[in-house]
Amino acid sequence: MVIISTTYQYNQQRDLIYSVLSEQLHDKASNYFDSLNMMMITGTMAQKETLRNKALAQENIENVRVLRGDAVSKLYGTGLNNQIAVDDIDRRALNGETVLEPFKADWGNGLVVALPMKASADYRGTNCIACHMTEEGEVLGAIRIEYNLSHVNGMVNKRTAIAVAIMAAIAFLGYLSTIFIARRFIVGPVQTTSKFMTRVSGSKDLSIRLSQKQNDEVGDLTNDINAFLDTVSESLIKVQTTAQTVSSNADKLTDIAENNESTAKRQLDETAAVESNMQMLKEQQATVSDATERASSLMQETCELTRASSIEAKGASDDIELLVQDITEVSTIYRSLMPRQSKSPQFSRPSKVSPIRPTYSLSMPPLKQHVPASRVAALLSLRTKFAR
């Protein structure tokens, strides 16, 4: 950075000096032509070499030449040897171009100025056309001055070296100051912070804090680290509390799981018992079904017996009804026979029991021939009672 800065300053100073010297050389060339113009007016052109020598006597002026153009050469001749164009710069100036540029010669590096002089009816109060009998704007000649820059370059180099030394000293002092300031206000606090973090990492103690001594970025870093430790500590406390809560909930869940397991076992046992009872119930249901079928068959048999008994009872009822009728009839007959028996009843007792046949002195009307045998037996039984 110092080299770049120095190089830039060197180029800037050199360009500035060259610019100032270029303007000065241009003014010197213009003044030199004015002096020649006055010598033309006063008729002292024979002393033009004296003017040239005076110009060469100035410091760092290496060469002064007055070049003649074609119009002047036609009127007054080619002049001296130093008035003839010898290089491209001379020819460019005689063509009307103002030349002002760096120049390198045997004596070293320098600046060259070639100022063309053009014919004018009023050049700073002088009518050039009247004397030289030429057209307006035609180049009459040129003034060439060569300036040696060795002294200027040496002065610039010397001052540049001084500036480089000063800047190097300043840079070195700045470097030392930067190192001191960095170690004092940056490296030192950062190392302290690093040691503190190593200590916290080794001891696992989140209660210690850094002391804040600076009101800069390092101090902000200290505050941020302390805030981070506070946050971590609070987070660990919350995590511990949450862990305890989770552990308690886990114990509760374990109890609930155990209760659920015992409940599930009981439900399994009950399910097994229900299944066994269902099996027994199915067996009993099968037994009941068989008993029901047997009962149904018995009921059918009973119903058939009942119907048969009902039929027999109905027949017996009919027989009883007929018997009652016969008894009623016998009773009627008996009542009709009672008076006759009171007058002269004659009975003959048989020696042994035989079919009961009462013997009456009067003949008994015969029974109806359609009476059933059972009714006849019943009537005979009744007659036996009556006979006794």
Image (cartoon, rainbow, N blue to C red):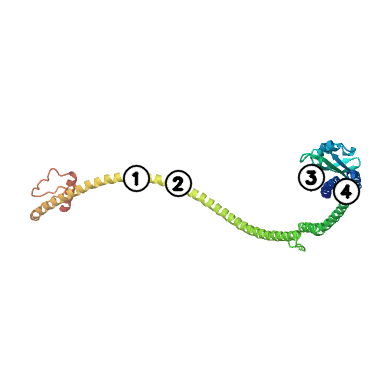
Amino acid under label 1?
Leu
Asked if the residues shown at circle 1 and circle 4 are in contact, with their CB atoms under 8 angstroms apart, the answer is: no
Amino acid under label 3?
Asn
Q: Residue 342, can we see it?
A: yes
Label 4 and label 3: CA atoms lie apart by 39 Å
Name the residue carrying label 3.
127
Q: Secondary structure at mark 3?
A: loop
Camera-nearest label, 4 or 3: 3
Label 2 and label 4: CA atoms lie apart by 133 Å
Mark identifier at residue 298:
1
Q: Residue 118, can we see it?
A: no
Q: Secondary structure at mark 4?
A: helix
Asked if the residues shown at circle 2 and circle 4 are in contact, with their CB atoms under 8 angstroms apart, the answer is: no
Amino acid under label 2?
Lys
Q: Position of residue 351 (x, y in %)?
A: 18, 48
Q: How many numbered marks have been drawn onto this rendered protein structure? A: 4
User: Toward the viewer: 232 or 24?
Assistant: 24
User: Toward the viewer: 44 or 354?
Assistant: 44
Which callout, 4 or 3, points at the residue further toward the start of the chain? 3
Name the residue carrying label 2.
282
Camera-nearest label, 2 or 3: 3
Which callout, 2 or 3, points at the residue further toward the start of the chain? 3
User: Toward the viewer: 112 or 172?
Assistant: 112
Label 2 and label 3: CA atoms lie apart by 154 Å
Q: Residues within 10 Å of mark 1 (few under 14, many from 20)?
A: few
Name the residue carrying label 4.
152
Which callout, 2 or 4, points at the residue further toward the start of the chain? 4
**Residue drawn at the location 51% of the way across and 50% of the way down:** 271
**Residue drawn at the location 49% of the way across and 48% of the way down:** 275
Camera-nearest label, 1 or 3: 3
